[in-house]
């Protein structure tokens, strides 16, 4: 026999919205969940998500309560399910808007949440939600470029607080692109450092580039990454161009890029540049 729940009055201030797994809006009222059934010129009609339960809620087009939700449901409310859905939605939103590791988002949101013990007991594990959240994140990210000639979206040219991050995007040799990234604070550390470390890593270079070139400054005996370069070749002209650009940027900032010592792996193409 179906369980019924008598709702003599409803608290319209208890109206909120969450997203379904398919990113569709769901209305939550007094721990019952409703999905959108139809929309007219003035009203949205929502029906309980439990199959066979025909309780409706009406809202305005701007999602303000307009009526309904007082009939008897054929089942009990499920506050745990609502709590779980809200926390899952928050995790997904953070995964889409931040670059924080999904596992870390999971731990932080579980710690922050005020879920009951019952809700925590049915909350999926990190590995259970990982695939879905990672897939949503992949969908939101631009496709990987198929060649080195791609336009960099503006979002990747700036830091999160809107300051410059792309320092140089050019080709000293035809079809050999150089990209340099770093923010102003990193640059100031670099230009103030007497010792600079330079090193390239090849195994982690993205498709179309042969190496990630990293320039570190030393600050209070700590080695700090200041400039990241994506290079397509290992020729002196490329390293020379990096120095030219950094010297120019230093000059624009009223500084100079003239470290007393530069420490680098033995790289035949770099040495002539350092000597010059
Ligand atoms: Zn129902």
Image (cartoon, helix red, strand yellow):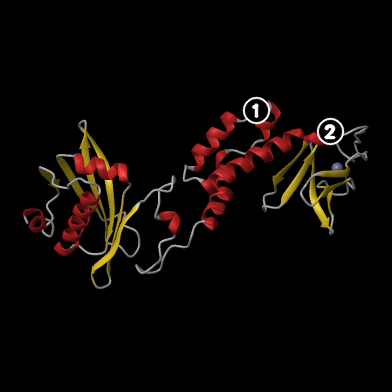
> Which residue is rendered at x = 17% and y = 43% of the image?
196
Q: With respect to residue 32, does 228 lie above or below?
A: below
Q: How many marks?
A: 2
Mark 2 residue CB less than 8 A from any atom of ligand 1: no
Image x and y of residue 7, in percent: 91, 34
> Which residue is rendered at x = 18% and y = 55% of the image?
243
Q: Is residue 124 left or right of residue 196?
A: right
Residue 88 or residue 228, whichever sits in front: 228
Residue 3 or residue 180, whichever sits in front: 180
Image x and y of residue 236, in percent: 14, 62
Kindly check if marks 2 and 1 are in contact, taking CB atoms under 8 A apart as contact. Answer: no
- How far, Cα to Cα, is label 2 from label 1? 21 Å
Q: Quadrant of ligand 1?
A: top right
Whether residue 92 is visible to the viewer of this picture, yes or no, is yes
Q: With respect to residue 250, does 177 lie above or below?
A: below
The dot on residue 114 is: 1
Eye-nearest disc, 2 or 1 = 2
The dot on residue 11 is: 2
- Among the two numbered marks 2 and 1 on one chain, the one whose residue lies closer to the N terminus: 2
Q: With respect to residue 24, does 16 lie above or below?
A: above
> Which residue is rendered at x = 82% and y = 49% of the image?
60
The dot on residue 273 is: none
């Amino acid at each position: 026999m179906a369980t019924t729940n008598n709702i003599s009055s409803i608290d319209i201030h208890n109206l909120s919205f969450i997203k379904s797994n398919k990113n569709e809006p769901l209305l939550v009222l007094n721990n019952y969940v409703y999905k959108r059934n139809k929309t007219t010129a003035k009203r949205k009609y929502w029906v309980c998500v439990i199959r066979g339960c025909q309780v409706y809620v009406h809202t305005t087009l701007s999602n303000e309560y307009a009526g309904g939700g007082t009939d008897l449901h054929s089942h009990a409310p499920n506050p745990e399910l609502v709590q779980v859905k809200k926390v899952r939605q928050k995790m997904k939103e953070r995964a889409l808007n931040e670059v924080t590791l999904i596992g870390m988002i999971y731990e932080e949101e579980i710690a922050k949440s005020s879920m009951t013990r019952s809700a925590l007991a049915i909350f999926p594990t990190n590995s259970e939600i990982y695939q879905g959240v990672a897939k949503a994140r992949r969908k939101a990210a631009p496709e990987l470029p198929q060649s080195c000639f791609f336009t960099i979206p503006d979002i990747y040219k700036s830091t999160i607080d809107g300051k410059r991050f792309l320092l140089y995007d050019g080709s000293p040799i035809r079809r050999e692109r150089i990209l340099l990234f770093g923010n102003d604070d990193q640059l100031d550390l670099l230009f103030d450092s007497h010792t600079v470390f330079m090193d390239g890593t090849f195994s982690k270079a993205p498709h179309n580039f042969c190496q990630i070139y990293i320039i570190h400054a030393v600050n209070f005996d700590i080695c700090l990454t200041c400039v990241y370069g994506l290079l397509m070749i290992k020729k002196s002209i490329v390293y020379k161009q990096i120095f030219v650009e950094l010297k120019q940027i230093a000059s624009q900032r009223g500084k100079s890029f003239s470290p007393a010592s530069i420490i680098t792996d033995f790289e035949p193409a770099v040495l002539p540049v350092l000597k010059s």
